[in-house]
Amino acid sequence: WRTYRYIVLTVKTAGTPLTLNDLYGTFTGYPFLLKASLNTKDNELLQIFNVGWRTARLCAIETYMDCPFYEQLQYFGDSRIQALITLYMTGDDTLVRQLLNAADWSRNADGVIQSRYPASIEQWIQPYALHYIYTLHDYMMYANDTTFLKSKLNVERTILDYFNRYQTADGRVKDLPGWNFTDWVDNQANWRAGVDLPGSDGCNAVMDLQLLYAYQMAADLENRLGMKAYADLYRQRAAQLKETIIRKYWRSNKELFADRTDKEVFSQHTNALAILTGTVDGDKALAIAQRIEAGDSLLAPASIYFKFYTHEAMTKAGLGNHYLSWLGIWRDYLKL
């Protein structure tokens, strides 16, 4: 499979003429039916919309794929966003259910899912197990099959049980095995291979906030569809973790959350997640969102993948009307 847009045909004839009777290419993509629409006179926005729709179709066959050109694998961090696009654009949850089933089938004896599945080579990106819980919550909000959803609550519980083993007495995560990838962040000393490196105490805010977000979503899932006892448990864990995050990572003279307890390095990731989890709100959240929007050099920048979360955070903080000004990288892609 390739994502080509053009065919170049070079012909060199010899002693006899050549007659071409036909030339064609075959488009391969998932047969989503577009039910959403964009009504605007802005041609550039229409181009972004159409390119995005074509990309969504190209990045899905039997499963979601990170890309049709390279690995062609269903990564659960990427697929959470792809699933939301599917639900918003089509209302069709078929491939989303496949995603949730595949992740379930990939679990190991510890109860944690692989980073991608199906795949012939095992890989473990532990935070992607938390993204499974985010996806499950999305399914509750936008899809219709409560029976299916309830059948997956046990996956959510085993994932959180797994992470709880690596929580310290104050709730923070320490010594988590696997590749603790969050985002591809370039030219930042405290990031390596997509991992925000922990401090001397073995902890970092990016991981703690991702777990906090999962506890909050799991509590909501359990409260609506599962067992109240689990909802209460996850609320308690979330409350403790939130209090610890504020105490350990907030740097008051910078008005930001630091990535580590030495409070010397900062990122858009940590501060966006702090807004999304309600760890900061009101005027403080707005001020942080404005610094993310402005590209404050103190904050390690998010890649296009994690911009989903920074955009959500800026919107939650009150900057949603600025959304069209955040599409610079998409406009750059059109130029390419």
Image (spheres, helix red, strand yellow):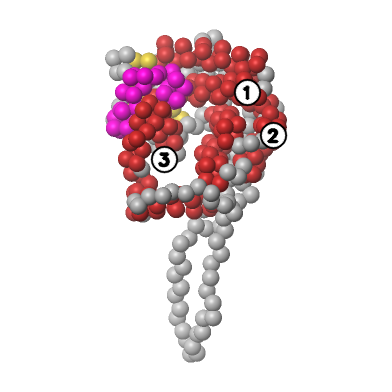
Please name the residue that numbered disc 1 is placed on. 224
- Residue drawn at x 47%, y 49% is 37
> Does residue 205 sit above or below 49 in this rendering?
above
Element type where label 2 sits in the image: helix
> Does residue 169 sit above or below 331 in this rendering?
above
- Residue drawn at x 61%, y 14% is 233
- Mark 3 or 1: in front is 1
> Does residue 6 sit above or below 91 in this rendering?
below
Q: Residue 295: image x %, image y %?
A: 30, 33
Separation of marks 3 and 1 at Cα, in angstroms: 33 Å
Query: Can you see residue 199?
Result: no
Amino acid on which the number 3 mark rests in the picture? Ile
Give the left or right position of residue 188, taking residue 66 as reference. Answer: left
Please name the residue that numbered disc 2 is placed on. 148
Of marks 1 and 2, which one's residue comes earlier in the chain? 2
Quadrant of the frame with the N terminus: bottom right
Dot 2 and dot 3 residues touching (CB under 8 Å): no
* Label placed on residue 304: 3
> Does residue 9 sit above or below 57 in this rendering?
below
Element type where label 3 sits in the image: loop
Which residues fall within the magenta stretch? 273-296
Q: Residue 92: image x %, image y %?
A: 60, 45
Give the camera-side residue of 223 and 264.
223
Q: Residue 312: image x %, image y %?
A: 43, 32
Quadrant of the frame with the C terminus: bottom left
Q: Is residue 279 magenta?
A: yes
Name the outermost residue toward the bottom: 15
Q: Residue 217: image x %, image y %?
A: 56, 24
Q: Crowding near pointer 3: few (<14 within 10 Å), some, many (20+)?
A: few
Amino acid on which the number 1 mark rests in the picture? Arg
